[in-house]
Amino acid sequence: ADSATLGGSWTINNTGKYAVVLEDVQSTAAWFGISKNSAEGTISIGSITAANRLMMGQNAAGARAHISGAFPLTAGDVLHTHWDITPPSGDALAKLRILRLS
């Protein structure tokens, strides 16, 4: 789902272990990441409550960067994307993958 105040969000439908990968290319260096069950909106990943931060990383200007991990998630958990700079809008270079492993 997309929201003007919360940004993009993805709800987990089934409890299990999930691989999560977020990739992006930005023109300037920036932090980006994923939060879990955060209602803190589209603010920077480094500014949200640490307990809600699932993962974060930084890209160099013009370079592709990705962050990934495997996490136990519960049905109803909501993942949100966060950027330090203006988040991509229809950016073909930003990709999020969520894969259920078990």
Image (cartoon, grey):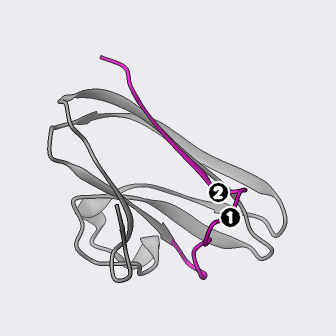
**Disc 2 to disc 1, C-alpha distance:** 6 Å
Q: Position of residue 17 (x, y in %)?
A: 29, 26
Left or right of 68: which side holds 51?
Answer: left
Residue contact at pointers 2 and 1, CB within 8 angstroms = yes
Count of marks overlaid on the render: 2
Does dot 1 land on a helix, a strand or a loop?
Answer: loop
Would you say residue 48 sits in the magenta stretch?
A: no
- Residue situated furthest top in the rendering: 102
Q: Which mark is residue 91?
A: 1
Which class describes the residues within 10 Å of circle 2: few (<14), some (14-19), or many (20+)? some
Does dot 2 land on a helix, a strand or a loop?
Answer: loop
Q: Residue at x 21, y 59 (%)?
A: 37
Amino acid bearing label 1: Asp
Q: Position of residue 25 (x, y in %)?
A: 75, 61
Q: Residue at x 59, y 82 (%)?
A: 86
Q: Residue at x 37, y 20 (%)?
A: 101
Q: Which residues are magenta?
A: 83-102
Compared to residue 65, the image places residue 31 above or below, namely: below
Q: Which mark is residue 94?
A: 2
